[in-house]
Image (cartoon, helix red, strand yellow):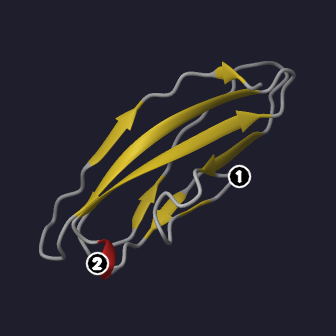
Amino acid sequence: MSRPATLLSFPTAVDSDWPLQNLSVTMDAGAADGASIDPASGVFSWTPTDAQALGTYPISVHVSDDGIPPMSATATYTIHVLESSATLILVDFQPPSAIPST
């Protein structure tokens, strides 16, 4: 993404178990200074600072349900922050796979 801009992303998680469970979304602490994610909706938001320009930031997003046993999945996004004169957004996504929580 180019500076200055705000990146909004909407990671998607679906729980096909019955009965339906509640999903909670988190990200690794310290992934990118100033980044946030809404635990209920999963909306990711980040406005990089000038100091974060020309950097690469891996963001790991975790989703878990409240089922028994609880299931979870993780996806990692790589965000490349470019100079303010650039107009390109690059996001690499690796699909998650659900695994039982331990």
Task: Tell me which residue sits at (41%, 73%) in the image.
Answer: 47
The three-letter code of the residue at mark 2 reads: Pro
Residue 65, position in %: x, y?
A: 76, 33
Q: Which residue is mark 1?
A: 40
Q: Residue at point 20% right, 66% down? A: 82
**Residue 58 point in image, percent of width and height:** 40, 49
Quadrant for the C terminus in the image? top right
Q: Secondary structure at mark 2?
A: loop
Considering every residue shown, the one lying at the far left of the view is 85
Describe residue 59's horizontal placement relative to residue 78 as left or right.
Answer: right
**Which x, y percent locates residue 62?**
61, 41
Name the one closer to the observer, 9 or 55: 55
* Numbered label attached to residue 85: none
> Which image quarter: residue 50?
bottom left
Compute the Cα span from label 2 to label 1: 27 Å
Q: Is residue 47 above or below residue 55?
A: below
Residue at mark 2: 4
Q: Residue at left 61%, top 22%? A: 98
Looking at numbered disc 1 in the image, what kind of residue is underneath it?
Answer: Ala
Q: Position of residue 96 (x, y in %)?
A: 51, 27
Residue, x 37% and y 37% (percent of image)?
93
